[in-house]
């Protein structure tokens, strides 16, 4: 009888196999779940955050901001923009606001610490217009026209950088402002102010110089937020305005205000507009 009971307790081979199969399935499920958890947390699958705006920050400041946002930054290129602070972020990729995963590397283009250098040309003996064209072709900027009595009007007599004479061949920073000392014959003293409303910033400056005048106060209204806006802004006010009753002399200054709001540009009668255009052509 005892033998019979003992025999009834023998393990059934099918049950043993089923238990091990279930155990194997459980292990696989756990491994898949663990892999999914690790994948989600390591790659942040499906989780994206907006890229902050690094513009005008130093590389150190950009790195600190990126770290707070769980990103990385890398400087990959540089340019030179004189109006920006040296070493500041000029451009970034991806752009601000784009959605990226945490840990993403953001590529930065910075404003060079050391600007490009230009060879100073020899402008003495050239006309003011020729000198201006030469400066622009070299990446330099025409500053003040300083008139002195001379037999030849608008003949360049000296070239100045920061108030001091600069010799031809001297290496200077790109976008340096060069003032010109030019001749003025007594019979040529009177000039005519150009009509500026509607002209963009750089065109207005060129028109003033072409009339042998200097740029006075330049004021941007509240619509102009940055340097790019300033290039697209148009003149809506100038002083003095071209007029038969207002006499200006060569070397006098013309001030103007600019805006992005074209509705501010004054509307002038057709006859006056024709007259002002005729004056500019002359």
Image: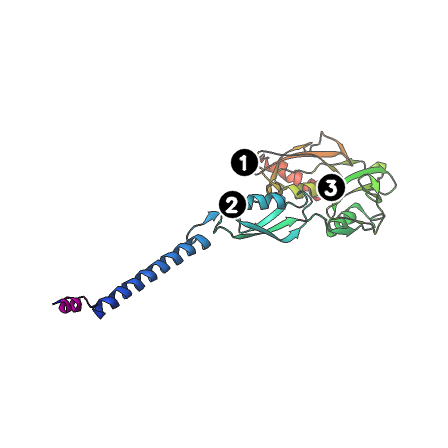
Which span of residues is magenta-colored?
Answer: 2-9
- The relative height of residue 184 versus residue 45 in the rendered view (above or below) is above
Q: Residues within 10 Å of mark 3 (few under 14, many from 20)?
A: many
Magenta part mainly helix, strand or loop?
Answer: helix
| SS label for mark 1 | helix
Asked whether 91 falls inside the magenta stretch, the response is no
Asked whether 8 falls inside the magenta stretch, the response is yes
Identify the residue under disc 2: 69
What distance separates the C-alpha of mark 2 from that of mark 3? 49 Å
Identify the residue under disc 1: 263
Q: Which is nearer the eye, 216 or 252? A: 216
Q: Is residue 8 left or right of residue 140?
A: left
Q: Which is nearer the eye, 100 or 266? A: 100
Q: Is residue 183 left or right of residue 18?
A: right
Image quarter (top left, top right, bottom left or bottom right) of the N terminus: bottom left
Identify the residue under disc 3: 209
Residue 212 percent location from the top left of the image: 76, 40
């Amino acid at each position: 009888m005892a033998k019979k009971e003992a025999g009834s307790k023998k393990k059934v081979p099918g049950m043993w196999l089923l238990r091990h199969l279930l155990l194997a399935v459980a292990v696989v499920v756990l491994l898949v779940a663990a892999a999914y958890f690790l994948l989600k947390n390591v790659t942040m699958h499906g989780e994206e955050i907006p890229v902050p705006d690094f513009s005008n920050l130093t590389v150190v400041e950009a790195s600190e901001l990126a770290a707070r946002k769980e990103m990385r930054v890398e400087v990959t290129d540089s340019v030179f923009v004189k109006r920006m602070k040296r070493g500041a972020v000029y451009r970034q990729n991806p752009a601000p606001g784009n959605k990226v995963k945490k840990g993403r590397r953001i590529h930065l283009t910075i404003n060079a610490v050391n600007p490009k250098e230009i060879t100073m040309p020899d402008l003495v003996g050239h006309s003011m217009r020729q000198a201006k064209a030469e400066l622009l072709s070299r990446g330099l900027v025409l500053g003040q026209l300083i008139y002195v009595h001379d037999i030849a009007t608008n003949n360049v007599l000296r070239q100045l950088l920061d108030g001091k004479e600069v010799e031809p061949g001297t290496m200077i920073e790109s976008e340096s402002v060069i003032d010109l000392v030019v001749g003025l014959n007594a019979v040529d003293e009177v000039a005519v102010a150009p009509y500026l409303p509607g002209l963009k910033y750089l065109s207005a400056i060129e028109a003033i110089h072409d009339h042998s005048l200097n740029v006075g106060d330049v004021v941007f209204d509240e619509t102009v937020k940055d340097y790019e806006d300033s290039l697209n802004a148009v003149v809506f006010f100038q002083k003095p305005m071209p007029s038969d009753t207002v006499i200006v002399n060569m070397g006098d200054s013309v001030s103007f205000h600019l805006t992005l709001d074209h509705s501010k540009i004054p509307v002038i009668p057709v006859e006056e507009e024709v007259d002002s255009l005729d004056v500019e052509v002359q």
